[in-house]
Image: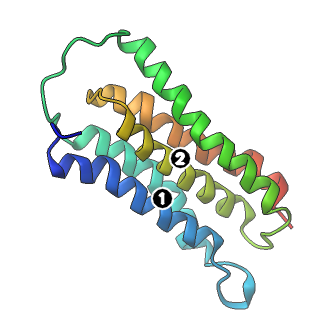
Amino acid sequence: MRQLPASYVAAQIGLPFLFGASCLAIALAPGRLGLGIGVGLVSSMALVGPLSYWLLALGMPMPHPLGAQPFGFWLGTLLCLDITLSWAAAPLLLVALSLRRAFVAHAVWRSALIGAALGLLSGGAINLHCTNVDRWHMLAGHGLPVLIAALLGAFLVVRWTRA
């Protein structure tokens, strides 16, 4: 972590944590009348969350030349993908159980936004752990789980959260 520039750490760790926390707050906000915040904001945040993570992974210059990858590209990428997904899946299960029948309106988008938020938080956490700064590794191993978590929220978690 000490070898990475502050801008890289802010973009790859700070922004996903900040945006993930914001997504979670928006998804759980009661809004006026207790129906949640408007579908326009919720749906755009659910789409922008994973997209922003991918754009940061592709757009940030590599802070240092990539050395030898101890596991090779595919095995290292699959390892990070598995870890990141597991870090998002456990909280998603707890959210599904704790928010049973909580969303009266826009349940699909709010559940997707919760999935995106937890994906972003786990994506930021894996960036603390993983030393591989290759943009394709970041995109596939760290960014793909953010998208998968959002889809899991939209298609699975919504079954429990819908009122």
| Residue 126: percent from left, percent from top | 43, 37
Spot the residue most to the bottom: 33
Give the residue drawn at x 25%, y 54%: 10
Q: Say whether disc 1 or disc 2 marks the residue closer to the N-terminus.
A: 1
Q: Amino acid at mark 2?
A: Gly
Q: Which mark is residue 101?
A: none
Q: Are marks 1 and 2 in contact (CB under 8 Å)?
A: yes
Left or right, residue 58 beside residue 48: left
Residue 109: quarter of image: bottom right
Give the residue drawn at x 52%, y 35%: 84
Left or right, residue 97 beside residue 131: right
Secondary structure under the numbered disc 1 in the rendered image: helix
Give the residue drawn at x 39%, y 53%: 16
Please say if 63 is above or below 35: above
Question: Closer to the camera, 20 or 53?
Answer: 20
Q: Which residue is mark 2?
A: 119
Q: Which residue is mark 1?
A: 20
Please say if 1 is above or below 79: below
Q: Amino acid at mark 1?
A: Gly
Quadrant including the C terminus: bottom right
Secondary structure under the numbered disc 2 in the rendered image: helix
At label 1, counting other C-alpha atoms closer than 10 Å, the crowd grade (few under 14, some 14-19, many 20 or more) is many
Left or right, residue 131 beside residue 152: left
